[in-house]
């Protein structure tokens, strides 16, 4: 009988192999039917537009590995962007200082989730659904729902709109660094093993001596930090910060996590799968544009991808058992 350790790599490769096929099919379909989808310029735009989703999805992977979920990431992104804009425009802080405000706000929001989930033992779904509304409501209150911070310095806009030598988007190295950091954390440290153990069985993890509350808190604080960093990239890419920034991003991040092979029930998943899936998600909207279809179909396709990812995950898991 094969040991669990020998079964685990086979499972990862099986799912990622299926994901690779899905990527190939997506590219082939958009290239065959659409116009100018396979081009260097379009690839750059896909990488640029996928940056925030990838950052959120990488952090969401750590949360879902514990058997939890963070529905507040998109709202926290919007709040972090608005507070950063207010710090620069209304308080007169230098942009270099205001940029640090967004991650700080993100970590504060993540810490709130962490306390409610890890210390008070409240269900993550209910907690983050509540903070989802709380963070978005605060952002809308600060801006009266209509105020839009614009006119950022060019040096700041370069973070989201600039190119490095070779035409590489500036945010791509940041996403790669985040992916490497989360990969090391999840797959090469005791903290990552603890996150997976909590996802399989919180009580079993406690009996094994894992500090469950601390590990859960770390996952949610990292999730908040990712939302704050993504807020900076988002505001720099679009040149604006308003209350509805990041609307729906939490669902796209969760879709990327599930599509990448992480079990929605926790305990099993890979950072590499999430990283690839984030760019699959990011290619959908440009692909639809290349087909000349209405943008209303984007949500339909996102929904189909979620359902398809769950079905694919179920089929793959049955084949490897």
Image (tube, grey):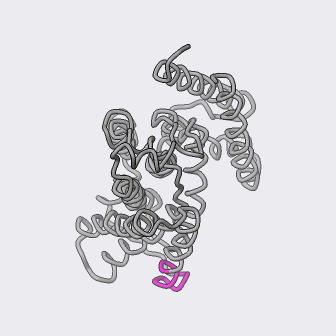
Would you place residue 117 above or below residue 7 in this image? Answer: below
Position of 136 relative to 224 (above/below): below
Seen in the picture, residue 168 relative to 23 is either above or below; the reply is below
Tag count? 0
Relative to 321, residue 209 above or below = below
Please indicate, yes or no, whether residue 232 appears anywhere in the rendered image.
no
> In the rendered view, does 276 fall on the left or right side of 284?
left
Judging depth in this view, the residue of 85 and 273 nearest the camera is 273
Residue drawn at x 73%, y 46% as measured from the top left = 301
Residue 3 in the image: state x and y as whole percent: 49, 19
From the top left corner, tell me how far across and down residue 168 is, in percent. Answer: 39, 37
Q: Residue at image x 54%, y 56%?
A: 69
The quadrant holding residue 261 is top right
The residue at the point 70 percent across, 44 percent down is 288
Quadrant hosting residue 106 = bottom left
Quarter of the figure with the C terminus: top right
169 or 10, nearer to the observer:
10
* Residue range of the region highlighted in magenta in the rendering: 138-146
Left or right: 26, with 48 as reference point: right
Give the residue at the far front of this rendering: 207
Q: Percent x, y for residue 246?
A: 53, 62
Image quarter of residue 14: top right
Q: In the rendered structure, does residue 172 fall within the stretch colored magenta?
A: no
Q: Which residue appears farthest toward the top when viewing the image?
A: 1
* Residue 275, visible in the rendered structure: yes
Magenta highlight: main SS: helix
């Amino acid at each position: 009988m094969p040991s669990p350790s020998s079964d685990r790599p086979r499972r990862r490769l099986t799912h990622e192999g299926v994901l690779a096929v899905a990527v190939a099919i997506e590219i082939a379909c958009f290239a065959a039917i659409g116009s100018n989808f396979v081009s260097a310029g379009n690839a750059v735009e896909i990488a640029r537009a996928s940056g925030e989703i990838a950052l959120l999805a990488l952090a969401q992977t750590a949360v879902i590995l514990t058997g939890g979920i963070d529905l507040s990431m998109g709202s926290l992104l919007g709040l972090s962007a608005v507070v950063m804009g207010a710090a620069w425009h209304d308080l007169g802080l230098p942009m270099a200082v205001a940029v640090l405000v967004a991650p700080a706000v993100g970590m504060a929001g993540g810490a709130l989730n962490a306390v409610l989930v890890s210390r008070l033992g409240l269900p993550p779904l209910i907690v983050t659904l509540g903070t989802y509304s709380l963070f978005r409501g605060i952002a809308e209150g600060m801006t009266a729902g209509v105020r839009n911070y614009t006119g950022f310095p060019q040096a700041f806009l370069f973070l989201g709109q600039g190119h490095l030598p070779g035409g590489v988007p500036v945010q791509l190295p940041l996403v790669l660094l985040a992916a490497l950091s989360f990969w090391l954390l999840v797959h090469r440290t005791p903290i990552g093993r603890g996150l997976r153990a909590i996802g399989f069985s919180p009580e079993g993890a406690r009996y094994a001596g894992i500090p469950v509350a601390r590990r859960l808190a770390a996952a949610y604080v990292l999730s908040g930090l990712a939302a704050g960093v993504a807020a900076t990239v988002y505001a720099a890419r679009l040149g604006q910060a308003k209350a509805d920034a990041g609307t729906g991003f939490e669902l796209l991040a969760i879709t990327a996590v599930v599509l990448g092979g992480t079990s929605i029930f926790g305990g099993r998943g890979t950072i590499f799968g999430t990283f690839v899936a984030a760019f699959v998600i990011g290619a959908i909207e440009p692909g639809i544009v290349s087909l000349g279809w209405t943008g209303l179909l984007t949500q339909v396709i996102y929904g189909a991808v979620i359902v398809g990812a769950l079905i694919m995950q179920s089929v793959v898991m049955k084949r490897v058992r």
